[in-house]
Image (cartoon, helix red, strand yellow):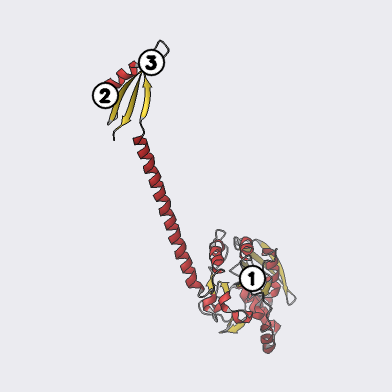
């Protein structure tokens, strides 16, 4: 079997989702390792995960959730990795989902983050070292920790050893949380869209979720969060509009109520009278004449113009 046969060999996956290109590679490489099934199960039961119990756990998937990897850089990429597995060299072109580093930084303030991928350690570690240089994610789980089911792989959250009310998993494949569907959040696949905003939009919900007594069912709580935000935004807009209308009304009333006084000379008064006779002055204007004596030789008359609207 040559290298091309190894790379393109496929395993049977769930019907509704075709396995990603890199999952195919992992599958065939994993085949050559010939792990003993019983030994593998024993390893899975010994998963080393956060045990502080002070914060909830957020499990993050890697491929098509945080990054997209391929063997060709035709559609652009962020970095290139040389991966050696079983003495074979693979060039992997990796595209990072927009906002990953800022997302991990903010999320780590509210959750203990666990990376759980169906990919191999030889691939996942160098990718995570680049996209998470500050090691916000201290726990990494790989293909060996997954459970085979229906010809595919799933992630049994019970192996984390935590109460499931405190565990959320974010993955682009529903099969990854088929054992605990109420704990799963299905995120949109990421391929190469540089305008992708999924992580930015998801973060406020996760921060809110970290304060809830039970994260389940995640999907329903997400809908509740969205509806509450929409109602809050509408109420805020109505309140601002109402305040604006009140201010404008008060401004108009003040303009109509406050008398305006102008000082004009005799010629100006004659012009005002002429305009009034011609019907050119503004309606509802009342003219009141007051005598005013000035120290200068030139005398003036002061008229108070007030609105009777």
Q: Which residue is mark 1?
A: 112
**Image quarter of the C terminus:** top left
From the viewer's side, name the closer residue of 102 and 131: 102
- In the displayed structure image, the side of residue 4 where residue 226 appears, left or right: left
Relative to 290, residue 94 above or below = below
| Residue at mark 2 | 276
The x and y percentages for residue 255 are 37, 36
The location of residue 234, given as percent across then percent down, is 42, 57
What SS does tag 3 mark? loop
The correct choice, above or below, for 27 with respect to 265 in the image is below
Instruction: Name the N-terminal-most of marks 3 and 2.
Output: 2
Give the percent coordinates (x, y) of residue 268: 34, 19
The answer to whether residue 182 shows anywhere in this view is yes
Q: Residue furthest bottom?
A: 38
Q: Position of residue 28 (x, y in %)?
A: 65, 79
Residue 156 visible in the shown view: no
Reply above or below: 146 against 307.
Answer: below
| Label disc, if present, on residue 275 of the rendered structure | none
Dot 3 or dot 1, earlier in sequence: 1
- Asked where in the image residue 262 lies, by quadrant, the reply is top left
Decide: few, some or many residues near mark 2? Use Cα within 10 Å; few <14, some 14-19, many ≥20.
some
Give the residue pinned by disc 3. Answer: 293
Report how far apart the C-alphas of labels 3 and 2 lie in the structure: 26 Å
Front: mark 3 or 1: 3
* Crowd rating for badge 1 (residues with CA inside 10 Å; few <14, some 14–19, many 20+): many
The disc, 2 or 1, on the residue closer to the chain's N-terminal end is 1
Query: Which secondary structure, mark 2?
Result: helix
Distance from Cα at disc 2 to Cα at disc 1: 80 Å
Circle nearer the viewer, 2 or 1: 2
Assign a secondary structure to mark 1: strand
Q: Is residue 62 left or right of residue 236?
A: right
From the viewer's perspective, tell me whether residue 130 is left or right of residue 169: right
């Amino acid at each position: 079997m040559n290298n091309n046969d190894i790379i393109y060999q496929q395993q049977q996956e769930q019907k509704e989702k075709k396995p990603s290109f890199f999952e195919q590679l992992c599958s065939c490489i994993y085949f050559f390792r010939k792990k003993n099934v019983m030994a593998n199960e024993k390893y899975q039961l010994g998963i080393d995960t956060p045990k502080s119990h002070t914060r909830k756990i957020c499990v993050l998937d890697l491929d098509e959730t945080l990054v997209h990897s391929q063997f060709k850089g035709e559609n652009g990429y962020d970095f290139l990795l040389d991966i050696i597995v079983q003495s074979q060299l693979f060039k992997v072109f990796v595209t990072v989902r927009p906002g990953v580093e800022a997302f991990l930084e903010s999320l780590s303030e509210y959750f203990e983050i666990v990376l759980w991928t169906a990919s191999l350690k030889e691939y996942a570690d160098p990718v995570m070292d680049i996209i998470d240089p500050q090691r916000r994610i201290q726990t990494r789980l790989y293909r060996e920790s997954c459970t085979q089911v229906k010809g595919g792989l799933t992630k049994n959250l019970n192996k984390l050893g935590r109460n499931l009310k405190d565990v959320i998993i974010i993955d682009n494949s529903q099969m990854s949380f088929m054992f605990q569907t109420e704990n799963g959040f299905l995120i949109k696949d990421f391929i190469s869209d540089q305008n992708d905003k999924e992580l930015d939009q998801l973060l406020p919900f996760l921060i809110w979720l970290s304060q809830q007594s039970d994260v389940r069912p995640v999907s329903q709580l997400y809908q509740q969060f969205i509806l509450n935000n929409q109602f809050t935004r509408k109420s805020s807009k109505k309140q601002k509009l109402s305040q604006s209308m009140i201010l404008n009304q008060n401004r108009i009333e003040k303009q109509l109520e406050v008398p305006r006084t102008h000082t004009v000379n005799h010629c100006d008064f004659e012009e005002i009278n002429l305009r009034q006779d011609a019907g050119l002055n503004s309606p509802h204007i009342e003219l009141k004449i007051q005598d005013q004596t000035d120290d200068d030789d030139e005398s003036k008359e002061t008229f108070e113009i007030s609105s009777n609207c």
